[in-house]
Every structure is written in structure tokens, then in C-alpha cells.
Amino acid sequence: MIRLSKQFLVLSAITVLISSTIVFSGCDSKKTTDSNTTSSGTASNQTKSKKDTIKKSEKYNVKLELEKYNLPGVFTMNKPKGWKVYKAGDYNTLAFLTRDENEPLRQAFMFSEIGIFYVDGNQKEIEINYQNSGGYKVPWIDMPVVSPFNGTTFLHNFCSIMNSQIGKGFLGSANMPIPSGFEQIDIISEENISPIYPGMSTVLVRAMLINNGKAAQGMFTLSTYKDAYGHGTAFFVAGITAPVNEFISVKDTLLSTMKSFKMEDRYVQAGVNVIKENGERFRQISKTISETSDIITKGFNERSKSSDVRIAKKGDQVMGVERVYDAETGEVYEVENGFYDYYKTHQEQYKQKDLQQLPDTNYDLWNEAPLINHSLVIPK
């Protein structure tokens, strides 16, 4: 009991130092038929021209226009036109989120720090027992155990962290919404990259997010820190996300938004003066955000192409569609789910006689924005 008390005094001291720098975000707690399909079940593209029946899907080719945004006395950035910007915290707790309110899965965000949470289940048990035995209230007692502490487990626990009392309090005080899509997350890849902060591991994570029946893909960076008492903090959590099929077309614009973020010199100096011990780390933030966009770009360019196929398939599954391609022309089509099984035994009903499923190893086909041929449906 004496050892526990001494230990908790150390934890209390850590609380004083760290709780003032805690930053949290949170979680937002088709059939296509053709009116010209004939009554006999013959696909309408027998009589319609290719120009009439095929169109490029706009959802694969989204264009974002940037505009200047200025939060006087704090920071400037170039954000997509019409997007809203939210800011929470100050100095080393600074966080921002910019997103399309009409499609919240289009977003870019940065949080200087997220913590503290548990990385050791035994430590959480010790602190629960301590608090229940009449000890001081532990501010982070409702935090999850993120173990092993890496990018994958952190993002899997993202919602739990954001829904903690401290997380809700932080965001609520700034009237800042939570990033969208983290209720269901599928980690595609994680890799170690050059550390952003000395002595901390930094990872680049690629993931799929599912929100209200829509799928998005995203790329995230974070640096991990563990203290000697079973607690962890994620530093400099940054990410970009967009609906899965448009990600490639908008990622450069979102990265430009991250790269353009710059805090005003007066704000930086004020933060250095206020923070004292970690002031110089805070001074790095504006520069680091710019570097993060380069890190994400490098990671995307060096990604495993097989992960592209996994993301595309998962996205199609969520949206109830599949892809086929014409082996003669090389054109890729998005069709309703189940089409190919029907097509295999009813090819005589279709003008295209050599439609095939996309091979997993043909990465060029999977990365091509498909055409939508509204006659390529299962005849009713």
C-alpha cells in the first residue's frame, strides 16, 4: 500500500505535466437497373450506342478547389473551398479538423497529442483498485488499454479514447466535432518511418473506414510514447481520408492542405513562452505538419499494390457493386453485385462477349476509374 501511494504520487506529478497537454478527437458516435431492359430479359445495350450507355462515374473523379483560410492570431492554411475548419486546444494541445460537411468522410486533421491512456492492463487494474479504495480520482481511468501500443491498436481504440471523459470535455469545450468514420476501421498496412520526434517511434498507417454504409480510405501518421508506469501518449496524430473510390483523385489536394498549415510567428513564440519545458517541441509543429504531408506522399507512392486491390474490393463490397473488364478493349466497368455470376451463363444477352473479373494481380485495372454501363445489369 505504501508502494502504491508513492507510485501514485509520481503519477499525480505526471498528471500535472501531461493533462494540460492532452488533445483528443473522436468518432461520429443498389441495385442499379436500366429502364430500357427489355421484357424478354435482353440487355438494352443491344440497341443503344456505346456513347449513350456508358459514362464516366463522377464519384471516381472528384476535384477540390483550394481557398485561403486564416484564423487570426493562430494559423493559416489552404483548405478545400466550402469546407469548414474547427480548432481546439492551444499551443502544444492545438488540434484542427477541416472537412466537407456534406460528406464528412472527406477530411484532414491534426492533433498535437492524444493521451494519456493505458498500455498495460495491470496498471489500469492497480489504479481502479486504488481509486475504489478511497484514493484520489484518476482522470484517465476510463481510458482503454492500447496494447501492444502501435498504430494499428491505437486506431482500433480511437473511438474508445475519443469517447473518454477527457476527450469529450476537450472537444466539447471547443465545439469541435469528432473525425468521421472510425467506428469501423480495417487496417490495411502499418510501417515504421523516420521518427518525427527524437526517441519516439513514428508509423504510417493505411486504413479503410466505414461510416453509414459508405467506405473511405485514409492515411495516418502518429508517434508513440510510453512512460514507466503503464501509460501511453500519441503525439502528432495526423491524417487524411476520402471516400474509397475518390481517394486517389483528391489525396494530393488534401496533402496540399496539410502542407500549407502554418502557425503565426507570434503564436508560436507565445506558446514557447507559456509551455516552458516542451516549448521547443511545440515550435516544431508547424514545420512537422508540412513534413507530414511529404511523409504520407512518400508512403503512398511506396505502398504495396496488393493493398490497393484489398481496398477496392472492400469498398465495392460495402457499396454493393463489383467490377468486370472487357478483355478485348481493356475497359473496366462497375456493375451491380452478382452480375458476373449471371453473365457467365447468359452471355448471349449482352453485346460484350468477353467480360471477365479483374485479376488480383492486375493492379492497373484495379486503379483505373471504372465506367458505369447501366445496361450491364441482371435483366429483370
Image (cartoon, helix red, strand yellow):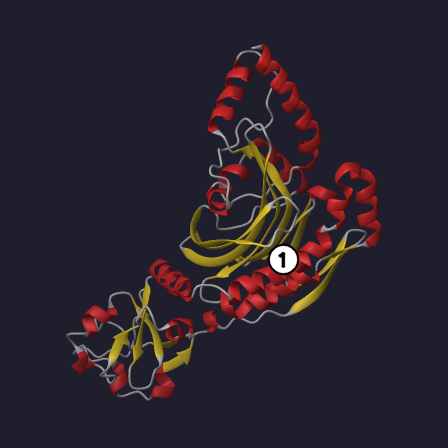
Residue identifier under label 1: 292
- For residue 262, which quarter of the picture? bottom right
Q: Is residue 263 left or right of residue 250?
A: right
Rendered location of residue 289, percent (x, y): 67, 56
Q: Is residue 298 left or right of residue 275?
A: left
In the image, what residue occupies the spot 60% across and 60% down?
A: 295
Q: Is residue 351 left or right of residue 145?
A: left
- For residue 91, which quarter of the picture? top right
Rendered location of residue 133, percent (x, y): 53, 11
Q: Confirm whether residue 42 shows in the render.
A: yes
Tell which of 154 and 109 is nearer to you: 154
In the image, what residue occupies the spot 22% across and 83% down?
A: 353
Q: Identify whether 376 is placed above or below 229.
A: below
In the image, what residue occupies the spot 28% across and 76% down?
A: 376
In the image, what residue occupies the spot 52% across and 15% down?
A: 132
Q: Residues within 10 Å of mark 1 (few under 14, many from 20)?
A: many
Image quarter where the N terminus lies is: top right
Image quarter where the C terminus lies is: bottom left
Tell which of 145 and 63 is nearer to you: 145
Q: Confirm whether residue 89 shows in the render.
A: no
**Kind of element beneath mark 1:** helix
Q: Is residue 16 left or right of residue 238?
A: right
Which residue in the rendered view is the most extreme toward the front? 199
Rendered location of residue 345, percent (x, y): 15, 74
Q: How many marks?
A: 1
**Amino acid beneath label 1:** Thr
